[in-house]
Image: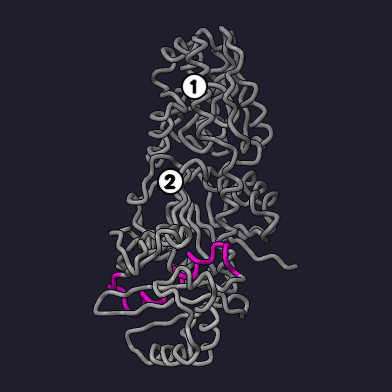
Amino acid sequence: MKKNRIIFRADGNTVAGYGHIIRSLSLAAMLKNKYHLVFIVQKTDDFLKKQIQNGCDELIEIPVSGNGKAESKKIAKNILKSSDIVVLDGYTYDLNYQQEIKKHCFKLVCIDDIHDRQFIADIIINHGEGIKPQDYSIQKFSKLYLGTQYAILRKSFLKKATGKRPALSTTHKAFINMGGTDQKNYTEKALSTCINNKTIKSIDVVIGSFYPYKKQLNQIIESNKHISIKVHSNLSEVQICSLMKQSSLAICSASTISYEYASIGGFLFVYQTVENQKNIYKFLIESKVAYPLHLFDKTLLTLKSKKVATEYFINRSNYFSGNSKQNLISVFQNLEKERDLTIRLAKTGDTLTYFKWANNKEVRKNSINTAPILLDNHKKWFASKLKNKDSRLYIIEKDGIPLGQVRLDREKNNAEIDYSISQKFRGKGFGEIILKNALQLYMLNFPNDTIIAKAKQSNVASNRVFEKLGFKKMQSSIINKEEYNVYQTKLH
């Protein structure tokens, strides 16, 4: 069976570093069994190119360009198919870029960590902690997946972080990685910190091919032969994992490399090397997953305490549960539920389909009027609704099979919503999907309306659906001697 494609778009260079590409490849590895993976990248170095070729089915190189508008149009015209999922990871994909891509693909996903611009993507993933939905400017019904439960890590780092502390020692083996480029040479700062602490007996320093200070690094090593210092460049995931496991502490930039070390390594110290790391840095320090580098010597003294060290590792295991891979796969599985989904206005030929759904035992049970509906009465009601300019009846189909219906009855700028799912498709998460699709279509005609929903308190599934879609519970009321929750959301 031919696989659908996921198109990844990210770059790696002296400005962007390795992070966006490595992060995208980590996600690609999780999805490889399900999708045909295509990676679009501007001209990059051989190391990153090889990483992409090893992890994806296709590599497409495009010219280096600062013109995002022109680039997005070329990608949309020459590469994209309407069935593609596109994943953007980087800071240059502004609103215009997203709009052009979204018009030509099935679904758009953005990986983000700084929430500094508007998003119209279907999905936004930010694996930083402490981020709130209100921090984002997003399109109505875009979905946010936030926190370390969605940590995008390479395969070697996906297991649950151990809550066990390693054997305490009076000396340490250090691991240093300040990112793939490190243009301001924070590696030297980290190395000097280790050299000046007498408990550090050996150091593994990992640098990338874009690192410009190799000469200075070699001079430091020559001047400090009393300590074992090894420099490693362009390591594989497995090699980096091995070095991390051999170390008892690390100094890393506040980036995904810190997450990877926190999942398998010893004591972690971090330094914010660029502005876009401020959120992850804040989380790592405030949650005590890591310690600030400027407190290196003082912290190592406190970590001699068995109690303090044990508490540190137990706390860290709370944030890296080992479930992020399955959580991320589920995000894409939910997207797939919308594939081959069509939505249209109901017509006279749908009369009996609606009648069958309306008289379903569960539907009647959860309706305001629970009595069975007579066919003649239904035909008259249905015909009147189709003619009513203030009613919108949408029917949703999957692979040509009727899946469910959504109805909105409008009065001035308010519309009350009702929906039901065909029995065949119940319990599979389609309630949220059909409501979202119907409301997105409704918004095209009535963007300023307020939507009102009523759900019996006993109907747990419907209450959960409205809450997931961002409806706010306004009140509880008694209707026909039954308790209802009344929800509301604004479309603008």
In the image, taking residue 385 as reference, residue 166 lies left or right, namely right
Q: Residue furthest right?
A: 1
Residue in view at x 54 percent, y 35 percent: 320
State the mark number for residue 312. 1
Foreground mark, 2 or 1?
Answer: 1
The quarter of the picture where the C terminus appears is: bottom left
Q: Earlier in the sequence, mark 2 or mark 1?
A: 2
Residue in view at x 53 percent, y 42 percent: 151
Identify which amino acid the numbered label 2 is placed on. Asp
Q: Main secondary structure of the magenta part?
A: helix
Residue density around tag 1, few if under 14, some if 14–19, many if 20 or more, within 10 Å:
many
Residue 331 quadrant:
bottom right
Range drawn in magenta: 425-450
Residue 312 x/y as whole percent: 49, 21
Identify which amino acid the numbered label 1 is placed on. Tyr
Q: Is residue 306 above or below residue 122?
A: above
Q: Is residue 271 above or below residue 480?
A: above
Residue 238 x/y as whole percent: 69, 35
Q: Nearer the viewer, residue 106 or 196?
A: 106
**At numbered mark 2, what does the secondary structure look like: helix, strand or loop?**
loop
Residue in view at x 53 percent, y 23 percent: 313
Q: Is residue 367 above or below residue 445?
A: above
Q: Is residue 79 visible?
A: no
Q: Is residue 442 magenta?
A: yes
In the image, taking residue 350 as reference, residue 381 lies left or right, namely left
Q: Which residue is mark 2?
A: 113
Q: Is residue 168 visible?
A: yes
Residue in view at x 62 percent, y 32 percent: 233
Q: Nearer the viewer, residue 486 or 113?
A: 486
Q: Is residue 467 magenta?
A: no
Residue 158 quadrant:
top right
Q: Nearer the viewer, residue 380 or 257?
A: 380
